[in-house]
Amino acid sequence: MSTTEHMGYLIKDYGVQLVEEGADTFKAKVNIEVQLASELAIAAIEKNGGVIMTASYNPRSLEILCKPIAFFLHGQPVSKRMLTSKTLVPYYTDARNCGYLADPAEFPEARLELAKKYGYILPDITKDELFKMLST
């Protein structure tokens, strides 16, 4: 675990971060949840009709994410997500960051703004044959 600065926030690195490397060649349609993502990384996902959500991970939830079979074999219930640090609340409540604490009503406008900024047409995922996978 290390401490770094990401988008102006000082954080402890123990999560899944989506970086910009390869954004120009990324072509997959995915539904992904990560701890942090850059604006360009979010645009790369949404440009291809994918869905991204940023959410807080603590060390225990990351351990479960990395080794789910071992966790479930112990028969323990999945605990609730722990509260994020106060410094990251603004990040996770912002729809532009696809934050899990953001108002869902703000997502369409944030997605449209990003599409305009990066010059792509936002796909209508409601008409996609993979809509069920993309919306859960």
Image (cartoon, rainbow, N blue to C red):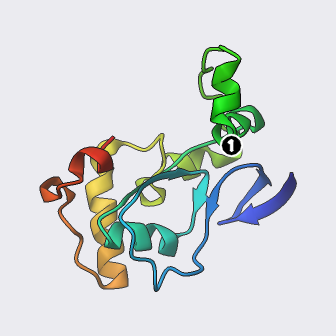
Q: Please determine whether, in this image, residue 132 is positioned above or below residue 2.
A: above
Left/right of residue 53 with respect to residue 21 in the rendered view:
left
How many C-alpha atoms fall within 10 Å of the one at disc 1: few (<14), some, or many (≥20)? few
- Viewer-side residue, 65 vs 37: 65
Which residue is found at the position 42% from the left and 74% from the top? 44
Which residue is found at the position 60% from the left and 80% from the top? 21
Left/right of residue 123 with respect to residue 74 in the rendered view:
left
| Residue 127: % across, % down | 12, 57
Q: In which quarter of the image is residue 29?
A: bottom left
Q: Quadrant of residue 111?
A: bottom left
| Residue 5: % across, % down | 76, 64
Which residue is found at the position 39% from the left and 76% from the top? 27
Disc 1 target residue? 66
| Residue 18: % across, % down | 59, 64
Split into 4 quadrants, where in the image is the C terminus? top left
- Viewer-side residue, 99 vs 73: 73
| SS class, disc 1 | helix
Let me know if residue 106 appears in the view: yes
Amino acid, disc 1: Cys
Left/right of residue 34 with respect to residue 131 in the rendered view:
right
| Residue 42: % across, % down | 46, 67
Which residue is found at the position 69% from the left and 47% from the top? 87
Let me know if residue 83 appears in the view: no
- Viewer-side residue, 127 vs 88: 127
Question: So how many labels did they put on this image?
Answer: 1
Q: Please determine whether, in this image, residue 50 is positioned above or below residue 122.
A: above
Residue ranking furthest to the left: 127
Residue ranking furthest to the right: 2
